[in-house]
Amino acid sequence: MYALIIDDSRAMRRILSKIVMPLGLEVVEAENGQDGLDRLEEMEPPEVILVDWNMPVMNGLDFVKTVRADGRYANQKIMMVTTETEPAQMVRALMAGVDEFAMKPFTADVLVEKMKLIGVRLPNPVSSNE
């Protein structure tokens, strides 16, 4: 089981990896939405996709729209990890098919709880109290 992390910031990919790897998920990284689509085509669907909104080449919203247009990913869990906090932007993303949001900056506990909320299966779940 793995998580696909899509963010143009190497530092943010590293932060997200350090949160999800102890949960038992392997990590596959991508630098932008197009890179994420390429990675998605190369392997089985991930347990969860964590995607940034603002990226070059292909942004996160276009990535989500493209993934949701492909029937193979109808049940794919997608979380937008972003600085976008405007209600109108959140509505756009929800309508495009995002399951949940984590607003930057976030804590590991918040990210884990949101993944659990949308039904992400975590091989090594940790409680929020640890």
Image (cartoon, rainbow, N blue to C red):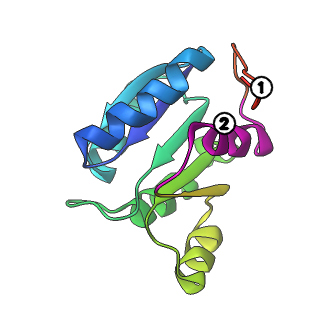
Secondary structure at badge 2 equals: helix
SS state under label 1: loop
Between 125 and 8, which is closer to the camera in this rendering? 125
Residue pictured at 47% horizontal, 58% vertical: 104
Residue 117 on the magenta span: yes
Residue at 70% across, 22% down: 122
In this rendering, the answer to whether 84 lies above or below 27 is below
Residue picked out by circle 2: 112
Main SS category, magenta section: helix
Residue 20 part of the magenta segment: no
Q: Quadrant of the N terminus?
A: top right
Q: Is residue 4 left or right of residue 107?
A: left
- The segment highlighted magenta reads 105-120
Q: CA distance from mark 1 to mark 2?
A: 9 Å
- Residue drawn 50% across and 52% down? 67
Q: Position of residue 24 (x, y in %)?
A: 59, 14
